[in-house]
Amino acid sequence: MVQTLQKAVSEAALILSEAGIDGARRDASLLLANILDADTSIFHLEPERVLNDTHHVMFQLAIERRASREPISHILGHREFWSLNFLVGPQVLDPRPDSETLIETALSAQKSGQEITSILDLGTGSGCLLLSLLSEVETARGLGVDQSLAAIEIAEQNAKRLSLDDRATFLQGNWCDSIEDKFDLVISNPPYIPIDDIESLQPEVKNFEPLAALVGGADGLDCYREIISRVKPIMKPNGMIIFEVGAGQAQEVSELLEKADFSVISCHKDLASIERCISAYF
Ligand code: GLN
């Protein structure tokens, strides 16, 4: 069947929008551009170009996957975070733009004098937080821990792809277990969704992202409690901890830190003005 790029995108966008996807045209364009190994300007530059049969079939398959609400990052196999390209998949949490708030918080603390030579990332997933920070702080080294071996394998590949594997190490483990070094920065975006809220999440999240990276117990705060109760012995004096928190959790996580005698507890908002990160000092 002869089909131009323009027509292929329009038809696919209709299918995606009927499947309830916001930004259907953007997703259709991204998927086709990826198959053509081009960027999306190709649709403006060559709208009448004819799609060959192989690309046509590949595009149909990609659109079927997206219409079933599989995240676009899983179909493309990668996701951009902090302007870096990360391999992702069903093994790891998809990096969210909101999480860039944590990177900004760490970098602004460094500007104000916080030492960042050793970073520990608890629940590293794709490694996006640790590797983004290492890309900015060239003198730092980091350790990423995750209970999932499949996640560690992705994080290690990401470190190699970004040429950061000489400064990043990854370890399978349960939070602070078996860590002996002391760090001047600990970061974590732990699973924080209350178990009963999972059902109401978008299909892309509840059907395709790893549950273990999402659920934080009955009230969503289990992982914060566990990390806060165990992290001090592996922090350097004057060390800093930065957590990402879910919308509405800032107050409760600040209180947990306060009860554990952390000091200078501060909230940091994301671009939507939601309190997204909490930082505190040992
Ligand atoms: N640290 C990773 C991220 O921020 C994974 C977090 C998680 O699995 N909860 O994307």
Image: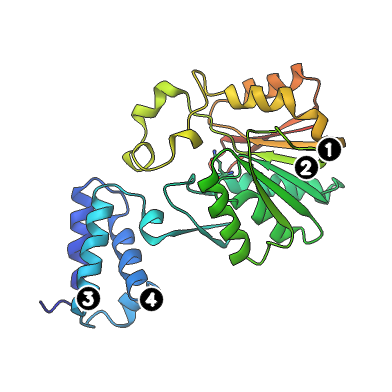
Question: Quarter of the picture for ligand 1?
Answer: top right
How packed mark 2 is, by other alpha carbons closer than 10 Å (few <14, some 14-19, many 20 or more), is many
User: Which of the numbered marks, if any, corresponds to residue 54?
Assistant: 3
* In this rendering, position of residue 174 left or right of residue 209: right
Bin the neighbour count of mark 4 within 10 Å (Cα to Cα): few under 14, some 14-19, many 20 and up.
few
Quadrant, the C terminus: top right
Residue 34 x/y as whole percent: 36, 69
Q: Which residue lies under the disc numbered 1? A: 239
Give the mark nearer the N terminus: 3 vs 4.
4
Q: Earlier in the sequence, mark 1 or mark 4?
A: 4
Left or right for 170, reference 46? right
Asked if 261 appears above or below 13 in the picture, the reply is above
Q: Is mark 1 within 8 Å of ligand 1?
A: no
Residue 37: mark in rendering: 4
Point out the tag, 1 or 3, that comes first from the N-terminus: 3
Report the Cα–Cα distance between label 2 and label 1.
6 Å
Task: Give the amino acid at mark 4.
Answer: Asp
Report the residue at 75% width, 20% height from top: 258
Task: From the top left corner, tell me how far across and down residue 54 is, in percent.
Answer: 22, 76
Q: Position of residue 136 (x, y in %)?
A: 72, 59
Residue corresponding to mark 2: 185
Q: CA distance from mark 1 to mark 3?
A: 55 Å
